[in-house]
Image (cartoon, grey):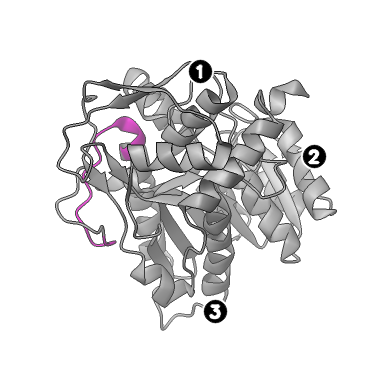
Amino acid sequence: MILVTGGAGYIGSHTCVELLNAGFDVTVFDNFCNSSPEALIRVEQITRKKLTLITGDCRDRGAMIKALKESQASAVIHFAGLKAVGESVENPTIYYDNNVVGTLRLIEAMQECQLKTLVFSSSATVYGDPVKLPLTEDHPLAPTNPYGRSKKMIEEMLCDLYQSDHSFKIAILRYFNPVGAHDSGLIGEDPRGIPNNLMPFVAQVAVGRQESLSVWGSDYPTPDGTGVRDYIHVVDLALGHLKALEALKIASEKRNSCLTINLGTGQGYSVLDVVRAYEKASKKNIPYRIAPRRPGDIASCYADPKRAHDVLGWQAKLGLDEMCANSWHWQSNNPTGYQQN
């Protein structure tokens, strides 16, 4: 049994699909602060398998202990947390409370239940402005916003935990830019309010929910002047979590069982690359306007995924065309996301 915190969210729901398809029993622990129960109904529809839902908040230590005991989980995949960079700048204490305190309470609950296997959802934002590219896991960490700092703090907590007790098996997965959707079109990214990330915003322009895209800066030192990022298909990302569980299962005292691994493709695409690919997938015109750079944005960011291949036996398989096609399939079938239900 795998306990998945935040399992109704974008990445969590796709990971639940892959876990169920791989034969795992799954319990989701979620407070639905930024997700919908409808996603879990659709996960069961896709897989034709049942999962267990426990509604609760990770900051509630008692509720976490109860969930771990009731589920009899053998491992935890920890997605629960807030993730909007701009919101974290405006309300940093909310991010430290949700992300850092929530993880601390989870760790305490795991210690109480003698559960020692954890896969943690981290982020490439911990690197900050790259000193060198591609980004390797030993690159200096210098996050530039409270969201990234909350992830860095959690990474440090988990490494300290492992140093204090080597019976813990921990995988810290640093995501680059998850996009796309399940090819069924039943689950996908459903941001609340105006999207913070590029592809869901482009998708909403294509479906008519937004008028046009603002391209923040066209004078970066990149091939077309717009920002370059490493976009990874959410299904590839989900499969990385299964590979991490496998790696931790065979980890031993002879091997470091606190793994820190990038999950990215190693390929950077510009904002305009994404716009053109989405126009091709949707057969829609994506109007955009060039706007001034946003403070804190960086020119380029992409992963060196070698360690993921060497340690996990994982590599991304789906390219930008599939990312855009699957995203459009989801968005066009669900123009208002899960809210229509």
From the viewer's perspective, tell me whether residue 58 is left or right of residue 125. Answer: right
Residue 2 spot, x, y in % from top left = 68, 57
Quick one: label 1, few (<14), some, or many (20+) residues within 10 Å?
A: some
Tell which of 177 and 251 is nearer to you.
Answer: 177
Residue 116 visible in image: no
Residue beneath the point at 34% across and 37% down: 272
| Quarter-of-image position of residue 255 | bottom left
Element assignment for label 1: loop
> 81 above or below 204?
below
> 197 above or below 93?
below
List the residue tagged with mark 1.
210
**What type of secondary structure mainly makes up the magenta span?**
loop
- Mark earlier in primary sequence (1, 2): 2
CA gap, disc 1 and disc 2: 28 Å
Residue beneath the point at 47% across and 30% down: 202
Task: Confirm whether the magenta stretch covers residue 18.
Answer: no
Quick one: label 2, few (<14), some, or many (20+) residues within 10 Å?
A: some
List the residue tagged with mark 3.
250
What quarter of the picture does the C terminus occupy? top right
Three-letter amino acid code of the residue under disc 1 = Gln
Residue beneath the point at 82% across and 46% down: 45
Region rendered in magenta: 136-148
Three-letter amino acid code of the residue under disc 2 = Ile
Residue 3 spot, x, y in % from top left = 66, 52
Quick one: label 3, few (<14), some, or many (20+) residues within 10 Å?
A: few
- Mark earlier in primary sequence (3, 2): 2
Name the mark nearer the viewer: 3 or 2.
2
- Mark earlier in primary sequence (1, 3): 1
Residue 137 visible in image: yes
Determine which of the numbered discs, if any, sits on residue 41 in the image: 2
